[in-house]
Amino acid sequence: MRERCCFAEAGSLRMDVIKMRLAAGENRMGWNFVKKVGVIACLTVFLVLPAPAWADVGDRPKKILFIFSSNFDYPCIALTRKGFSSAFSQHTHLGLPYSQEELQLSATEYEIDTHSLAASLKSKYAQDRQDLVVAGYKQATEFMIRYGTEIFGRIPVVFIGMDLENYETLELPANFSGIVAATSVQKNIELILKNHPATRKIHVIAGASPREQALLANTLAIGKSYEQRVEILGPEPLPYYHMLAMLNELRETEVVLYLTMQSDINRRLLAPTMVAQDISKAARVPVY
């Protein structure tokens, strides 16, 4: 029996959530902290707004601004933008105009002058008031924590693409909310052994970036406590398609535990959700 991990589409928005934030025009937003554990945690982050009336007749349409940490062509961001575009196209009756900014905040080749960037955005949006900002990934969220009120006033901010590790390092203002994803290594391993008691090897798959390697090292360290029950192996240093070919050769007593992958050893940029789909197609064994 073949099993695949399930990832929600990057843009499958909870439009009712956005609606709630905009309709209320609220500046006091409670925390919506969600931990997803089990088979695998997915970074599906998205908006939350219930359904009061949008605005009185004659009021201008509510505006949403998406701010992304990297350029629009980055795989994760391209996938997210595609998902948002699809979701908004299905809710055209709401009349929600939205715009997007790419801030290059995650670039490592050069230092970004965030103060000048903030001043530029403040000038740009001084006569184009926004009602909600969606901050895409950690750097954009940090930027909004530091400059958001100065640029846009105290409007609601929804962060996306945040895992528990990143969330715990931030002090978020009351007008910030979002969904946080978390993975429990122990629970995944226990679930694998419960569902597949004949498992002899668990192959852990992760990307080559420093953060992904740190996550892998932590997973392997936790896995040592299971060494009497199952062998837990890290990935071989293979290019992306070689890795997929290797997974195709696994035997029925082996299982794949996929963490995340944004780049391979050749620095090929990847979208983690698309990697999950490729892995589930390539592997003939269960994928978690």
Image (cartoon, rainbow, N blue to C red):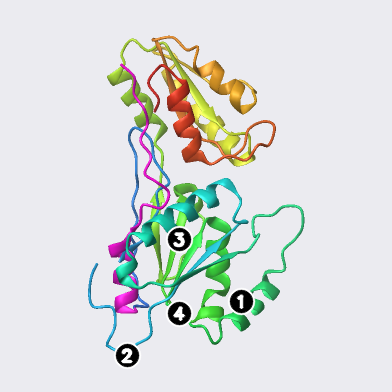
In the rendered structure, are the residues bearing label 3 and label 2 in contact, judged by CB atoms less than 8 Å apart? no
Looking at the image, do the residues carrying marks 1 and 2 touch, with CB atoms under 8 Å apart? no
Q: Which residues lie in the magenta part?
A: 1-25
The quadrant where residue 207 appears? top right
Q: Disc 1 vs disc 2: which is toward the camera?
A: 2
Name the residue: 54% across, 51% down: 78
| Circles 4, 3 touching at the beta carbon (< 8 Å) | no
- Residue at 68 percent of width and 37 percent of height: 267
Q: Residue furthest bottom?
A: 58
Which residue is label 2 attached to? 58
Instruction: Note whether 12 is above or below 214 in the view shown.
Output: below
Secondary structure, mark 3, is strand
Choose the circle earlier in sequence order: 1 or 4: 1
- List the residue tagged with mark 3: 159
Relative side of 51 to 121, left or right? left
Q: Is residue 76 above or below residue 231?
A: below
> Does residue 58 sit above or below 174 in this rendering?
below
Q: Quadrant of the N terminus?
A: top left
Look at discs 1 and 4 and give the one toward the viewer: 1
Q: Residue at x 62, y 83 (%)?
A: 123
Instruction: Give the residue type that dot 4 points to.
Output: Arg
What residue does disc 4 label? 154
